[in-house]
Image (tube, rainbow, N blue to C red):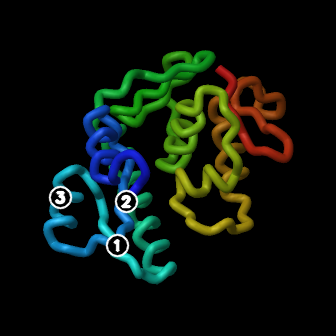
Amino acid sequence: MLPGMDGYRVLKNLRDDGLEMPVLILTARGQEADKVLGFRLGADDYVTKPCGVLELLARVGALLRRSRMADRAAHAASPDTVEKFGVVEINPASRTVTKQGQLVALSPKEFDLLLTLVRRRGAVASRVELLREVWGHRVEVMTRTVDIHIAELRRKLEDDPSQPRHILTVWKAGYRLEP
């Protein structure tokens, strides 16, 4: 019931173009044949109106969670290339970090945090974003977890942790990695 083309055609065009973002169909069309067509064309969920706002929000949240988990699994399963900055090398496939050829022992969360920063290619990550991406926090909680882990990464990877050259604080915004 969209102007110009229906939602099924929009969905088919998205999938034909290779776009894999999560899609939820929200429609008044509740026949089984409509639902089956939606799923066959690549929908991830199908909700018929009328529906409650809380249910809709829960379904969207579930889609986003599954999408993030699939993204993480794809990164873990693919043969990632070694990431580098300064004299530090990060090998996602083996989950190892070396500095000047020497293995650096990182905790699993320190490794995930470092990889998250590196993959942002210099873009700033707020504390809340890092809490969500690395620790899976869904609420904006006040915690020093990110700051403590950043301090540990600096201690282990920076030549002078008190004057970091790579793992930088962006005041009132968050952190970024400067290659």
Mark 3: amino acid: Leu
Q: Is residue 112 above or below residue 164?
A: below
- The amino acid type of the residue labelled 1 equals Ala
User: Where does residue 103 sit, x and y in percent of width and height?
Assistant: 48, 28
Q: Secondary structure at mark 2?
A: loop
| Disc with the residue nearer the chain's start (3 vs 1) | 1
Tell me the CA gap for discs 2 and 3: 15 Å
Residue at image position (35%, 62%) is 25
Question: Farthest front residue?
Answer: 4
Q: Secondary structure at mark 3?
A: helix
Q: Is residue 11 left or right of residue 161?
A: left
Q: Is residue 134 above or below residue 31?
A: above
Q: 31 or 167: which is nearer to us?
A: 31
- Say which quarter of the image contains residue 55: bottom left
> For the residue marked with disc 2, what is the amino acid?
Met
From the image, tell me which residue sits under label 3: 37
The answer to which image quadrant residue 99 occupies is top right
**CA distance for labels 3 and 1:** 14 Å
| Mark number, residue 28 | 1
Which residue is painted at 64% across and 39% down in the image?
Answer: 153
Residue visible at 45% across and 74% down?
56
The disc placed on residue 1 is: 2
Mark 3 or 1: the one toward you: 1
Chain-order first, disc 2 or disc 3? 2
Q: Secondary structure at mark 1?
A: loop
Look at the picture and state if 174 lies above or below 28.
above
